[in-house]
Image (cartoon, rainbow, N blue to C red):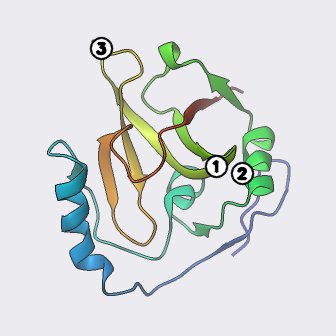
C-alpha cells in the first residue's frame, strides 16, 4: 500500500498483522498506571500505531520520522492551534527534544480547565485508549493542530 500526503509525498509505513503476545496483559497494567478515567477502546494490534490512527485512518503503521510528520503537517494543511482554542477533532502531537514521539486525536476539551483535553491515541503495539492528554507514558510537551483548508 502507498500512503501519500495531499501533495503526493510518500510516507514510510508498513502493515503488521502480528503483535507481541506480551502486549495483551500490558493493556491492563497501562489502565491501572495511567488513571481511572482512561478507557481502552480496542484490543492490542500491531496493524497501526499512533500516527497510523491520527494520520492514516488506522490503515498502517506510520514510522513517524521527522520529515514525514512535517510533510503531513505542511502538505495536508495542518496549522498549529493555541491551547485555549483547541476543539474536539484537533490533533495533539507530543514532542521530546523537538521531535514528535506520539500523536492522537482530541475527543473532548474540559470546560473548566484550560488546556485539559481527553485524547484518543494508540500506544505502540498496544491498544487505543481514551485518556487525559497529560496522563500518558509520553512526555507532555505538546502542540495542537487543525486542518485548515
Residue at 50% x, 58% y: name it: 50
Sequence-first tag of 2 and 1: 2
Q: Quadrant of residue 115?
A: top left
Crowd around label 2: few <14 · some 14–19 · many ≥20 (10 Å):
many
Q: CA distance from mark 2 to mark 3?
A: 30 Å
Is residue 8 depicted above or below 22 in this figure? above
Do the residues under discs 2 and 1 have CB atoms within 8 angstroms?
A: yes
Secondary element at tag 1: strand
Q: Is 6 drawn above or below residue 77 in the view shown?
A: below
Q: Are marks 2 and 3 in contact (CB under 8 Å)?
A: no
For residue 100, the mark is: 1
Q: Where 142 sits versus 13, above or below?
A: above
In the rendered image, the residue lying farthest to the front is 97
What x and y, as percent, mark residue 12? Answer: 74, 69
- State left or right for residue 133 relative to residue 131: right
Tell me, for residue 111, which label it has, or none.
3
Mark 2 or mark 3, earlier in chain: 2
Q: Quadrant of the N terminus?
A: bottom right
Location of residue 66 (image quadrant): bottom right
Residue 145, percent from left and from top: 61, 31
- The residue closer to the viewer here, 143 or 47, is 143
| Mark 2 lies on residue | 69
Q: Callout 3 environment at 10 Å: few (<14), some (14 to 19), or many (20+)? A: few
Check the picture and name the quadrant holding the C terminus.
top right
Amino acid at each position: 500500500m502507498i500512503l501519500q500526503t495531499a501533495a503526493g509525498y510518500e510516507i514510510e509505513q508498513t502493515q503488521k498483522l502480528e503483535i507481541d503476545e506480551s502486549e495483551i496483559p500490558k493493556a491492563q497494567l497501562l489502565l491501572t498506571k495511567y488513571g481511572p478515567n482512561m478507557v481502552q477502546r480496542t484490543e492490542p494490534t500491531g496493524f497501526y500505531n499512533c500516527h497510523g490512527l491520527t494520520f492514516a485512518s488506522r490503515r498502517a503503521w506510520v514510522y513517524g520520522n521527522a520529515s514525514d510528520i512535517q510533510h503531513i503537517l505542511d502538505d495536508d494543511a495542518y496549522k498549529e492551534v493555541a491551547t485555549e482554542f483547541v476543539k474536539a477533532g484537533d490533533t495533539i502531537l507530543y514532542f521530546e527534544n523537538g521531535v514528535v514521539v506520539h500523536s492522537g486525536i482530541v475527543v473532548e476539551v474540559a470546560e473548566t480547565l484550560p488546556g485539559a483535553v481527553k485524547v484518543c491515541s494508540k500506544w505502540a503495539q498496544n491498544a487505543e485508549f481514551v485518556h487525559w492528554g497529560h496522563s500518558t507514558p509520553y512526555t507532555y510537551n505538546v502542540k495542537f493542530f487543525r486542518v485548515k483548508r
